[in-house]
Image: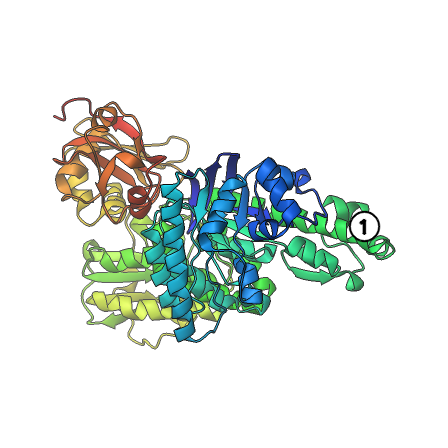
Amino acid sequence: MFEIKYKDNRGRVGLLKTKHGTVKTPALMPVIHPKKQKIDVKKFDTEIVITNAYLVYKDEELREKALSEGIHKLINFDGPVMTDSGSFQLSVYGDVDISNKEVIEFQEAIKTDIGTSLDIPTAPYETIEKTKEDLKITLERAKEAVEYKEAKNMEMLLNSVVQGSTYPELRSYCADELSKLNADLYPIGAVVPLMENYKYRDLVDVVMSSVSHLPDSTPRHLMGAGHPMLFALAVAMGCDLFDSAAYILYAEDDRFLTTRGTYKLENLQEMPCSCEICNNYTPDDLRAMEKEERTKLIAEHNLNVSFAELRVVRQAIIDGDLMELVEERCRVHPMLLDACRQLDKYTDDLEIYDPRIKKSAFFYTGSESLRRPEVTRHLNKLKNMDKKRDLVILPKSRKPYSKYINKSDFGDFYTYGSERDLDLDNTDFMVLDVPFCLIPLDIDEVYPLSQNESPKINDIDSIEFIENFISEFIEYYDQTLISSKIIDLLGIGLYNIHPDSDNVKFIKDDERKIKAIADYQFGNGVGEFLFEGNLKIEKSKKTGKIRHIYSNSTLIANMRASDSFFVLAKEGAKRLHSFKAFPENRVVVNNDSEPFAREGKSVFSKFVLDCDINIRSKDEVLIVNEDDELLAFGKALLNHNEIMDFSTGQAIKTRKGFGNIVS
């Protein structure tokens, strides 16, 4: 029903399949009033809409037409239709004239594609006692709805709404309980007041505490979120669907939606974008129109902007620069910037879902970039890597650092720790870098350490971030030598110049480099085992970069030019398998999949029995059977959680299979 095609952070470009068509997500569902349609949303290539089943049920004329002809004909839309159950009316009026079972049965009868149980929307900041009472009813109704749907063998997909007010622990509890019910989609409800009152920081807590406890294999719908300036942030948190009547409600109030906020027509001298409406009309033209015509045109602008922004978001996911877009969009309003910074609290969760390799370089846009998953991942790897006795910290130069570093003037080197004689063979050489703090020269070309850019003028936050990391990191070493240029930049209080300062020199060594990269990619100690024997390293004649590594004339691995990570050959996969303990780097497939894996066919999620919890999207992985026999190797398309949760779609793009026997 749902399949991920591209990933970045928690954002997904996916396909949601319904009986009336397939929807590309993230997607906006324009709200269509069943009786008062003012605009034909089909002209905007709208793939899915939402309408209110309760309003149809309450109107006798609409109800009879929907029951006889179906909801699609009633609202004149032949694509997928989602219906709400009347929960909004319940939140406004305190009661509705329909039961949970009745509304489920009615939605199936009018042939809706995606129906919704009658949850209890609990307003933000409600008392915890009231929230728990409402939540109990919501969960009971969700369970009743799923069981009723299954008992009646209904075709429609079913929403189960996550509630819990602004209590993260209750949102998580609700998500956990709903996940047991086998619903098809999971909306996150009762968040409109947070958005209306610019409580975006609280919105982050509500969404993340919900999404992190929901299945990865089902779409998540942020109910009532229809302002385009929110889409990038919400998608980065894992939301796939949005609905809103904002496009028409704002238009009725002469307000224009944009990614930079909302503009009142009365204040405009220029039109706010380049859509068809903004190109063909001026603010004066609109002000001179009749209200009905003006409202229609502004609504069209609002839909144009909203759909355009979702196209931008989807492309950002494909390119791998979604967080740059989030940081850019969140700078349009201080409360949105608060939300972006609140997301830092969830960096460890986001790192699990962030692909290891991306198409785009890492662009530092401000202090918020310091907490991106790529930075956290690198710093964790630095802390866990095998270390030599001493550390030398060098200033930045032209990239790649290892190629140009010895052409730089380092200045004197100041000593931290016990002063010892210089031993270049027992020294780690690293370059100070924003935002990655320290980049070992032996791995400086791997993604994203070489593929990153930051301003030449450093901001205070980045300097403090680096200072804090270095002050902790140098404690791993007996002696640290720090270039005087870095002493000046960071204002470090060191006064003893090492007597061998003039002899500090980084000596390039290709064998040491490939082993360091293998350790960084696969784990400590892998490099020595993977690249043992009589090595031959082939380089590109054009770029001078390492391309192929042979041991005893057998190809072990190829180094990918774009990111300098290794793509294993058959012998390399065998060596990695024999060195790493089960289940590290492994994906375990069932008996049905084994012969296909041996032939080099891709592995689908439904055939996976288990896999290494540390697998991230784009990792090189080993494909084995339950006896840990090596069947094949390839590239993970999903992370551990997603592989284990999905029952459809590809999990591993297999590179090579080993046939019937692994020698």
Q: Nearer the viewer, residue 543 or 62?
A: 62
Can residue 410 be seen here? The reply is: no
Q: Secondary structure under badge 1?
A: helix
* Residue 52 falls left or right of residue 404: right
Q: Position of residue 142 (x, y in %)?
A: 40, 54
Give the labeled residue for mark 1: 293
Which quadrant of the view contains residue 211? bottom left
Query: In this rendering, is residue 466 above or below 524?
Result: below
Residue in front for this viewpoint, 271 or 44:
44
Q: Quadrant of the C terminus?
A: top left
The picture places residue 206, in percent across and down from the top left corner, at: 44, 64
Q: Is residue 17 left or right of residue 67?
A: left
- Few, some or many residues within 10 Å of mark 1 (<14, 14–19, 20+): few
Residue pictured at 68% horizontal, 48% vertical: 35
Residue 125, image x, y percentages = 47, 73
Total tally of numbered discs in the picture: 1
Q: Quadrant of residue 291?
A: bottom right
Decide which of 380, 354 is in the foreground and name it.
354
Quadrant of residue 250 within the rendered picture: bottom right
Residue drawn at (76%, 49%), measured in percent from left and top? 297
Residue 659's spot in the image, x, y percent?
19, 22
Residue at figure coordinates x 57%, y 47% from the top left? 50
In the image shown, does 253 or 157 lie closer to the viewer?
157
- Quadrant where the N terminus lies? top left
From the viewer's perspective, is residue 394 above or below residue 315? below
